[in-house]
Amino acid sequence: MSPLIEGRLPGRVRPELYHLRLTVVPEERRFEGEVTIEIQVAEPTDAVTLHALELEVSQATGGRNGAPLPARVSADPPSETITLHFPEAIPAGPAALQLRFSGKLNRQLRGLYEAQAGGETYAFTQFEATDARRMFPSFDEPGLKARFRLTVTIPIHLTALSNMPVVDQKADGKMKTVAFDETPVMSTYLLALAVARLESKEIEVAGTRVALWTVPGQLHLGDFALKVTSAVLPLLNDYFDLPYPYPKLDLVSVPDFAMGAMENWGAIFFRDSRLLLDETLASTGTQRGVANVITHEIVHQWFGNLVTMAWWDDLWLNEAFATWLAVKIVDQWRPEWNSWVEFQQEKQIPLGVDALQSTRPIQAKVTSAAQIEEMFDALTYEKGAACLRMIEQFLGEEAFRKGIRDYMKAHQYKNTASSDLWTALEAASGQPVSAIAKDWFTQPGFPLISLEASESQFRNLTVEQRRFFAAGRAVGEASPLLWSVPFTLKYEDDTGLQTHRVLLKNRVTPVPLPGNGAVRWVYGNAEERGFFRTEYNRPLRDALQPIATTALSAPERIGFLNHLWALSVSGDLSIVTFMEMLVRFKGDATRVVVEAAAGYFETLSNQLVMPKDRPKFQALVKEFFESVWKEVGWDPAPGEDDERRLTRAAALWAMGALAQDEEILSELPGGGHGIRRSRPRSIRP
């Protein structure tokens, strides 16, 4: 029988301080160590269970100081635990465990693993979510926070990095021993160790020592990362109203790394392509991607590290928040990058996943390491971030930020559940945040919001919700789920553009729009900040058609098209209706619109166009993109930005690969034979 209870340790014993000593010689691909764990025992026990995986435990003792008891060690590989059995009970109160162990540097890029660079073998850690247990026996759960004192013995020519600064270093022949300062209380998955040949560049940002570390020869590619950190760290200090809580911040480029990056407290590890670039050569898209990753990981230093979810069912508390706030901060720093427009595009991924009958809630029960790994997906990151943005916009940015600040200050160095965040936001805003959040974070899927109005009267709307399924309306109508929907309408009347917020709680809600006079048109998801799809009855849709390209913002334009496309794919709307709207966007040179349109035409080309109709289809594509193509042309203008370059790439691909335009094909090598039919990676589905 597994010693775990629903995947978690029994809870009778809590760690307080790990004294961890390791010897790591990367070339030998092995490590050995010993750990003393100061613990608190809730009730007398003769057995203590903790995590250990792929480790050889050669000796174990435990008990009060000065009276250690030898322990018999039994392993339960399926639960990734070992249990120490003592000849008599350890009494309640403070005690200690001592274990000696050894293991191999694995090649799975998890735990303490081997990495290769420049013909040398190095060692790095990757512990999230459940892999600290691969390096040392531990209480490897996020809710079991403790302090760590790490000392490591390594070859003298290598550098050791960890979460805290070095406090002592002694050489002994070909080896040296490096001792790190004691950490604040933190979860095991945030502990970090790097043993490698490394170079560094250091700056100071808002009173924090920031250092960038790379393997030899790459340091010159780190200037952009330091520029990003210099910009976003002060903005985050201000957003949380709490200064960065660690004595240093290392940004470490890891030569072999499975993740994009890992937010180890005080020592963030990155895949090299997510940290390093040549700013004179890298595109805006590449720079934006690197900036988002760096900012995401720095956000975690507060949200995730300083305040941590109690269990992995609330992983979104880490990842959704960091995803959302990283976009917000990068947009504050570089508004010309249009980060929220990019986010609107990325949101289509979880909207697609969440429309399937096999989807799951953002907050879902997990009881095994495999289930925990499955939580690192688009629903946790992007859907969670989109729902946070929706709630923020409904509450107002100031009320939302006050709630976040109160939450952080109340729970720093502790663990929380979702309810703690909702309570803080509710207190700051006076809105029923808990009820709203419960629907969005504990229910699967999302609603389709249908707006109806009479032919001549848009002032009074009828709004209905049902769950949206990719399989179609009939499936959705059978679903009993309802959401509390923070709903913001955008409309135009005699006084100009207006917005109106309402909380939809029922399946059908009458919504009278404030103001007087005729309402010319209504858009049902202002700035596309809500995580739902919208549809309109014929009068409302007809009113939107002529103004969509001029009165709607870029997120609204691509959102409007995507909702119509999703309804067409699900069979809820005729493809003719979608095409009638799509052709209205002919000549729109907004990069994301051009990319989206190219994606739609590609799908139509692959799935609907019959061979006999292909010449007509190619003529339609040419007519749609030709004015944009003539505007951007073959040659970039002096000082041209990446938005225009990417527009050119999308238009060129559509004109060549889809329209098979003879003039363009004649300019290509070989007359265009073999032009790739798949769209450039920048063009999303």
Image (cartoon, grey):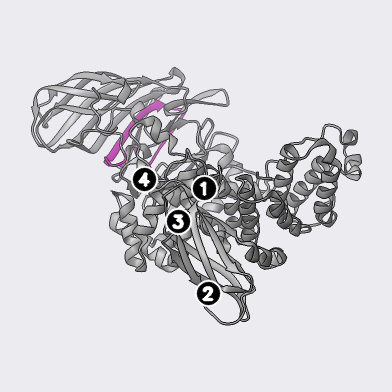
Residue 170 image point, x, y percent: 35, 31
Q: Amino acid at mark 3?
A: Leu
Check if residue 160 falls in the magenta segment: yes
Q: Indicate the secondary structure of the residue bearing disc 4.
A: helix
| Residue at mark 4 | 314
| Among the two numbered marks 4 and 1 on one chain, the one whose residue lies closer to the N terminus | 1
Q: Is residue 239 left or right of residue 653?
A: left
Q: Which mark is residue 513?
A: 2
Check if residue 341 falls in the magenta segment: no
- Dot in front, 1 or 3: 3
Q: Indicate the secondary structure of the residue bearing disc 1.
A: helix
Cα–Cα span, label 1 and label 3: 20 Å
| Among the two numbered marks 1 and 3 on one chain, the one whose residue lies closer to the N terminus | 1
| Among the two numbered marks 4 and 3 on one chain, the one whose residue lies closer to the N terminus | 4
Q: Amino acid at mark 2?
A: Leu
Q: Is residue 349 visible?
A: yes
Q: Is residue 401 left or right of residue 553?
A: left
- Dot in front, 1 or 2: 2
- Dot in front, 4 or 2: 2
| Residue at mark 1 | 294
Q: Is residue 131 visible?
A: no
| Residue at mark 3 | 388
| Among the two numbered marks 2 and 3 on one chain, the one whose residue lies closer to the N terminus | 3
Q: Indicate the secondary structure of the residue bearing disc 3.
A: helix
Cα–Cα span, label 4 and label 2: 38 Å
Q: Is residue 134 left or right of residue 197?
A: left
| Among the two numbered marks 1 and 2 on one chain, the one whose residue lies closer to the N terminus | 1
Q: Are marks 4 and 2 in contact (CB under 8 Å)?
A: no
Q: Amino acid at mark 1?
A: Ile
Q: Amino acid at mark 4?
A: Asp
451 or 76: nearer the eye? 451
- Dot in front, 4 or 1: 4
